[in-house]
Image (tube, coloured by chain):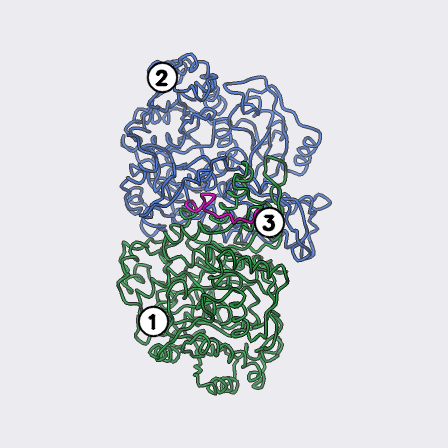
Chain colours: A green, B blue
Amino acid sequence: MTLSNIEIAQAARMLSIQRIAEQIGIPDNALEPYGRHKAKVALGWLAGLDDRTDGKLVLVTAVSPTPAGEGKTTTTVGLGDALRRIGHRSMICLREPALGPVFGMKGGAAGGGHAQVVPMEDINLHFTGDFSAIGVATNLLAALIDNHIHRGNALGIDVRRITWRRVLDVNDRALRDVVVGLGGPDNGYPRESGFDIVVASEVMAVFCLATDLADLRTRLGEIVVGYTRERTPVRARDLSANGAMTAILRDALAPNLVQTLEHTPAFVHGGPFANIAHGCNSVVATRAALKLADYVVTEAGFGSDLGAEKFVDILCRSSGLRPSAAVIVATVRAMKYHGGVDVADLATEDVEAVERGAPNLIRHLGIVRETLGLPAVVAINHRAEDTDAEVQALVAVVEQTGARAVVARHFAEGGAGAEQLAHEVVRLCDEPSTLQFTYPDDATLWRKMKTIATRIYGASDITANTAVRRQIQRLQDEGYGGYPVCVAKTQYSFSTDPKLRGAPTGHIVDIREVRLAAGAGFVVMVCGDVMTMPGLPAVPAAESIDVDENGRIVGLF
Amino acid sequence: MTLSNIEIAQAARMLSIQRIAEQIGIPDNALEPYGRHKAKVALGWLAGLDDRTDGKLVLVTAVSPTPAGEGKTTTTVGLGDALRRIGHRSMICLREPALGPVFGMKGGAAGGGHAQVVPMEDINLHFTGDFSAIGVATNLLAALIDNHIHRGNALGIDVRRITWRRVLDVNDRALRDVVVGLGGPDNGYPRESGFDIVVASEVMAVFCLATDLADLRTRLGEIVVGYTRERTPVRARDLSANGAMTAILRDALAPNLVQTLEHTPAFVHGGPFANIAHGCNSVVATRAALKLADYVVTEAGFGSDLGAEKFVDILCRSSGLRPSAAVIVATVRAMKYHGGVDVADLATEDVEAVERGAPNLIRHLGIVRETLGLPAVVAINHRAEDTDAEVQALVAVVEQTGARAVVARHFAEGGAGAEQLAHEVVRLCDEPSTLQFTYPDDATLWRKMKTIATRIYGASDITANTAVRRQIQRLQDEGYGGYPVCVAKTQYSFSTDPKLRGAPTGHIVDIREVRLAAGAGFVVMVCGDVMTMPGLPAVPAAESIDVDENGRIVGLF
């Protein structure tokens, strides 16, 4: 009988969070416990570790996501557990799952099978309240904007040019486009606006890139919320909002410590969307983990085209973090899907389809090894229905590139199933790593976007209509040209067409929209459709989530 | 030099929450710590106390609120401390402050001076995440409604008759009236709606009236979210929403334990608005406290016309809780304000104005003693500028009614300043208490409203236009006639005119609107204007709230 993720998680014997903390030398007085199995680690104590040598950072990325699932988080957890099993002091750094999608289609996002972080229900629900705090900070700023206008608009904000949107951690399509301020003069000035999901907010990106409270406060102040009629940017600090926003986020900025099913310590902290934002957990958490462990395994959202590229070009650039090696997660099923097989037929053996789909993996491998300069190994996340012939075919394709592919069975076996992967990662971490950015700081915004599109996505060119080009030029002229570009595009394809599987080349990337994220310190280029507020499916997961007569949560995946 | 509330609170030496719990016999394994000074007490452990005898419940209410401030929460805390000082095992039960108003005008709401619950910043900000959970549950239900309609509307919900509103814990007038679902077919059907502040939500009322998780789940299922074209009610359970909502609220339902500045244990849990909802902390917390302490001091929102009446007629009726005595908080300043003095002149001695304003207090005293049948004492919450002549005048007026008035100096002196009050409360608790409801269950909704208006508010009659009368009749016909009435009206006057100070009589109470709260189990009658989403003032408190270089929050009152 196969147990569900939540059944495995609920059956786990967790250690007290104090015991977990002890393993990595965190004293009791540096812990703020949230229940018995979660704790925040005090920023003040972490600041005292600055002199320590950093451990090695391992970045987990993946092939282009498919409906078949790849198991990036699961592999991150399994690898962390395996590194610990083979004798290293290891830690894991993950993003916090968004609450909204848990009630939609997605179920939990804390790993799977025997490679999970726990307590799984808590992590998937409110956890330590970080996302709530990010939501309140975002919505307070929105209220201050409308209140400022209502009270006379001394700053001359143009109500047509307010870019700041409110957020909720709920999948709610009805909030994507709304009109607020209706109902008469007491309710302010009517205007068009909308809500995003919390993980798509700039405050989330700022939170994850900030290095400490002071940096957080400064970045929040830099946020551009809109423009005057004369197109002068209006910032959060012009509204004296950033102090209160920092107060709201103060406790949240301390990283959250939990454990894996095998008691490996894990920070689960921050969680920006990888399509609209940079898609990595907080810099605060990763930095802290590097002071506490010899190997730190972290993941970046979606495939290497989105996650790894942004990890390097945005996060590493601003934070100074440097990964020593990378793991690219692939599954036989995902390869078959990229090879053109329908979802319904993925369980049938099809070696040729694996080979047809493999170029997607090889492209990702090339991005990581050649473009970004990281030593990399392919982790084949094994599933029960994979045949030996399929697995061998996939290994063979990878080995033709000079890289290695390792079969990992952590889903079924926990860390023991990923020991070979762990040994390979340790070996790679000792190889010379020559991390390089995709583009230099001083390239123009247009050039940066073109470089990403051609070098990473395999596109032949980029396009944009006149209005968008003018907007890019304006940002360039206003002094934002030095910012990195954060591409918002579909995760399902190297192109902007989610249906284009495999490793397409020669396509054109059209920039639909440009958004300034001055607090986060990047310029978002929206290419194709991008979702900043998901909707619920025809049968929402919420319908089957419940609490049983013993007070236990049921129906979470 | 006078210290601000936050300065006093931050200078406090708190005991660990385990030490506080020990005092009242809560074992370590029944605590879910949230940091070092907050904890949730496990519902499972509390359920095991059912056989214990209850302590005595003391209800704190007040005169009609004025801009001068009365200090109801402060007195509740001071009395709890004083009861402990004179040798009783006491506990305090308070509402959790709403986050939104903290950034508006109000500052904190955790007591004041030397009578506060701490950690004050935490309690005023995110605390243990209860309000966030209540917000998510409310907004998930809203998303499920719009998704249901978008997906074909099998239940036939009339989009014009959806009564369920979304919530945020932010003061944001721009969200009072909005249009959602704009932007084309992908975003659902456009319709008018709006946002309330979390504390005004029905989920908050349900949360505070529920006796356990199963009751919570049932009540959430009963919530009526709107109607079909044929006026059939559509309930949350018809959308299979109540299981997931219960899962979201599961952890939140365990009461939050904190301490006063003097280490008296306090539950701070739940916080429905007293104007739109019933205005008392959770039944779960009060019941638990009665098993753990000999004296439990709790407060009900605003004056006795709103708070005490609803405490008795709604909360006591549904939960079986029975207070043994009541305290009515008054200040010399508030009496002068009710006596017609302008806010600017309140610091000037004016004995006659005290006497002119005292009828407000006497009316509240009569409601509590005669209408509700509770032994009661007046607590004169002393302020530095009160003169002896003013205080004596106020005491004299109270004594003419046969009741006692005690001067309490807990704001300046902590519990030591309220010992006389504590002795009087203990004496009253031994007097026979003959709690009586204002109206019987089987009176019609109209008759219930009329009884409240005439007996409590001193009105001569109630009115309503034809549409409202028809709506009341419809609810009566549909079987909701047995519910108690929850009046939503201004807290500043016995009448529906906030400017009518003192103790007006002969006025007419017009019912503007009727709302069914089928989950909470009451019918809301809105009389005059009532605010379910506050706005920010011209200079929001947010502008001065900040984090200093040591990571300390500053600017909270």
Q: Is residue A81 above or below residue B5?
A: below
Across and down, in percent, residue B268 comes to: 40, 41
Residue type at mark 1 is Lys
Across and down, in percent, residue B327 comes to: 40, 26
Number of numbered labels in the structure image? 3
- SS assignment at label 2: helix
* Range shown magenta: A230-244
Would residue A469 be visible to someone looking at this image? yes
Residue type at mark 3 is Ser
**Distance Cα–Cα, label 1 vs label 3:** 44 Å
- SS assignment at label 1: strand
Label 2: which residue?
B391
Taking the image as shown, residue B406 lies to the left or right of residue B192, namely left
Taking the image as shown, residue B388 lies to the left or right of residue B470, namely left
First-in-chain label (1 vs 3)? 1
Label 1: which residue?
A56
Judging from the image, mark 3 belongs to the subunit labelled A
Would residue A13 be visible to someone looking at this image? no
**Distance Cα–Cα, label 3 vs label 2:** 54 Å
